[in-house]
Image (cartoon, rainbow, N blue to C red):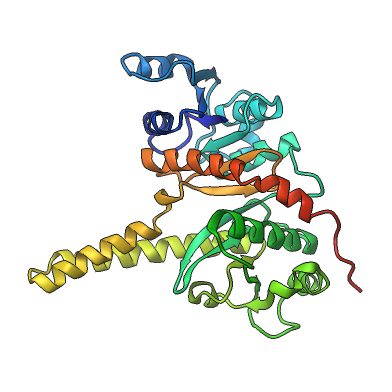
């Protein structure tokens, strides 16, 4: 499988991205990585490294989109930035996937400019896997589409359910619509109309209706749908609160001296590792004619390698083919 890796994206780029690519290449003999970025810098960093030269290609790019830059302006000024070149490789069918830990807005904007949408997909969305009391759930969309329409939310439910079933092994995933109340008729025109789409569709049997914010982590649904603005706020608040809680609890546990608390500390760190983003690598941009993983800016080499592995798994599970099959037509609502 051929994957374009944005070597210049992320807080610790390009070193971390190179390490992640080399780790993945050492474990997957069928993987070919295109490292996209400053060719001279990448060649220097790889000069004394042992790696499969027939499966690692340096693809030159001119500059990159910084985390603080406005994506559309930056891409207009830097048409050959590393993330733009990654998507060009996908559009030219030279790679099957794009992976980046760079500016999320730029990753999405560069992808949308190519119009590489799957058949019948109206708007791609970003999905993330969140921990719950009963396992894990998918939240979609978390930032790709802040101005969603009802039909977009309906399609996010379909794509999220397919991801949950094929990638997470959840049979008949329960789909819920994020809302301010569980009763019918709650929320904005957007969510009320999306609710009608779900009720009129073949997904109705797995659709559980509205889910309040607190229901996300209670495990009330396996897939929770929302527009990108709300989803991004939920994600950032969740990350901030989780980080605060882990820091406080870790400090309390590590400062304890007795054996029972030390054992509790080990259990705590195991739980933390289970839920940290490095284990899955990143968040897929679903609905693209190809594959895309958007990684956290602070990703380390393990996270980058796992993102490459997730792309391979999505390809092996025929994720996109299933999405196309199940989005043949929109349900009719009154």
Q: Is residue 248 left or right of residue 328?
A: left
- Where residue 273 appears, x then y in whole percent? 33, 57
Quarter of the picture containing the C terminus is: bottom right
Q: Is residue 179 left or right of residue 6?
A: right
Rendered image quadrant of residue 170: bottom right
- Where residue 36 appears, x then y in whole percent? 52, 24
Q: Residue at x 78, y 72 (%)?
A: 189
- Where residue 169 appears, x then y in whole percent? 55, 60
Say if 272 sits above or below 10 in the image. below
Q: Is residue 252 visible?
A: no
Quarter of the picture containing the N terminus is: top right
Q: Residue at x 31, y 15 (%)?
A: 48
Q: Is residue 162 visible?
A: yes
| Residue sitting nearer the eye, 203 or 103 | 203
Q: Residue at x 46, y 46 (%)?
A: 281
| Residue sitting nearer the eye, 199 or 79 | 199
Q: Is residue 178 left or right of residue 7?
A: right
Say if 111 sits above or below 282 in the image. above
- Where residue 158 appears, x then y in whole percent? 71, 60
Q: How many marks?
A: 0
Q: Residue at x 52, y 77 (%)?
A: 214
**Which residue lies most toward the bottom here?**
183
């Amino acid at each position: 499988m051929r994957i374009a890796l944005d070597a210049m994206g992320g807080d610790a780029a390009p070193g971390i991205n190179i390490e992640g690519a080399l780790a993945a290449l050492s474990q997957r003999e069928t993987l070919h990585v295109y490292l996209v970025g400053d060719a001279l810098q990448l060649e220097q960093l790889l000069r004394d490294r042992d790696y499969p030269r027939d499966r690692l290609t340096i693809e030159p790019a001119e500059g990159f989109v910084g985390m603080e830059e406005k994506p559309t302006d930056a891409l207009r000024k830097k048409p050959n930035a590393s993330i733009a070149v990654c998507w060009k490789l996908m559009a030219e069918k030279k790679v099957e996937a794009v992976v980046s830990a760079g500016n999320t807005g730029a990753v999405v904007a560069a992808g949308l400019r190519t119009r590489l949408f799957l058949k019948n997909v109206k708007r791609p969305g970003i999905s993330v896997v969140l921990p719950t009391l009963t396992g894990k759930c998918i939240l979609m969309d978390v930032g790709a589409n802040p101005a969603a329409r009802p039909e977009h939310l309906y399609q996010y439910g379909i794509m999220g359910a397919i991801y949950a079933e094929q990638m997470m092994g959840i049979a008949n995933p329960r789909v819920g619509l994020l809302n301010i109340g569980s009763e019918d008729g709650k929320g904005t025109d957007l969510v009320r109309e999306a609710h009608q789409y779900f009720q009129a569709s073949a997904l109705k049997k797995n659709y559980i209706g509205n889910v309040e914010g607190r229901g996300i982590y209670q495990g009330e649904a396996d897939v929770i749908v929302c527009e990108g603005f709300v989803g991004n706020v939920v994600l950032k608040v969740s990350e901030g609160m989780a980080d605060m809680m882990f820091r406080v609890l870790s400090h309390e546990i590590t400062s304890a001296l007795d054996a029972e608390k030390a054992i509790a500390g080990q259990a705590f760190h195991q739980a933390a590792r289970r839920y940290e983003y490095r284990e899955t690598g990143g968040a897929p941009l679903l609905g693209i004619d190809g594959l895309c993983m958007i990684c956290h800016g602070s990703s380390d080499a393990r996270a980058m390698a796992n993102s490459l592995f997730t792309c391979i798994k999505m390809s092996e599970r025929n994720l996109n083919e299933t999405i196309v099959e199940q989005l043949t037509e929109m349900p009719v609502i009154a």
